[in-house]
Image: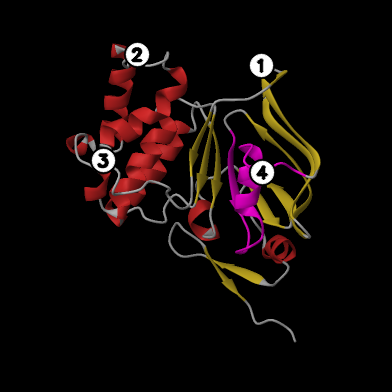
Amino acid sequence: MNKLIEIQNITVDYGAKIVLRDISFTLWENDFLGVIGPNGGGKTTLLKAILGLLKPSEGNIAFYENGRTVAALKIGYLPQINQIDKDFPISVFEVVASGLIAEKKGWRRYSNDQRQRINATLDRMGINEKAKCPVGELSGGELQRVLLGRAIVSRPQILILDEPNTFVDKLFESRLYQLLEEINENTAIMLVSHDTGTILPLVKNIACVNETLHYHAGNNLTEEWLGKAYHCPIELIGHGDFPHRVLKKHEE
């Protein structure tokens, strides 16, 4: 299996505050990596470093395609907090279509193939009937579907999701996880979530980010590993198909 991203000993800081320290791991083709960790532990900062939005003060991030280093990869990104101004006059179709801007040639219109991909993505997200609607008329869950559509319409090599179920309505949540399994057949996924229990049945490997990074191959986490990674005691409790996590009593 070929690697897509290799991160070697990166440190990221905001001035005097170090957020990530000496982070190293590899993301492989068709991997589904769950990124967990406490609030403020550096999960979103790690994503921003991979996306080139933050430059590490130390270390290196390398991208690979077919075993060779490349300058960049095609990455789809769904941020934790959407940046769309809901008062801006843009339609659902146009937002999803914006995921193909890098493929367009200048000011030309979208090709028939591109329009078919956009419409297929709208249908996949269950929002085809709202294609002409202004985004300002959407609920939070509907807007999250639109932004996910924008992230996948280009058929990226890697899909990065930062808390994707934050605004997703419950009717679409199970469909979201099914979609991610389908997407993972051809695309590597990094999914950041504070909800350890929900993502465990989905992912193939786990990375816990809490200033440093603890990598766990597979998703069969132990109580001991979680406690070490979070720097506090955590207990997994089985509940149906989804385990949940709770904090144990901390020792004074």
Identified by mark 2, the residue type is Arg
Q: Quadrant of the C terminus?
A: bottom right
Name of the residue lying farthest toward the bottom: 252
Question: Within 10 Å of the Cα at label 3, are there few (<14), some (14-19), or many (20+) other Cα atoms?
Answer: few
The residue carrying pointer 4 sits among few (fewer than 14), some (14 to 19) or many (20 or more) residues within 10 Å by Cα, namely some
| Marks 2 and 1, how far apart at CA | 31 Å
Query: In the rendered view, how is the structure colored?
Result: secondary structure
At label 1, the amino acid type is: Asn
Question: Comparing marks 4 and 1, which lies closer to the viewer?
Answer: 4
Crowd class of label 2 (few under 14; some 14 to 19; many from 20; radius 10 Å): few
Mark positioned earlier in the residue sequence (4 or 1): 4
> Label 4 is placed on what type of residue?
Leu
- The residue tagged with tag 3: helix, strand or loop? loop
Distance between the alpha carbons at the discs numbered 2 and 3: 21 Å
Question: 102 and 160: which one is in front?
Answer: 102
Task: Say if mark 2 contacts mark 4, CB within 8 Å.
Answer: no
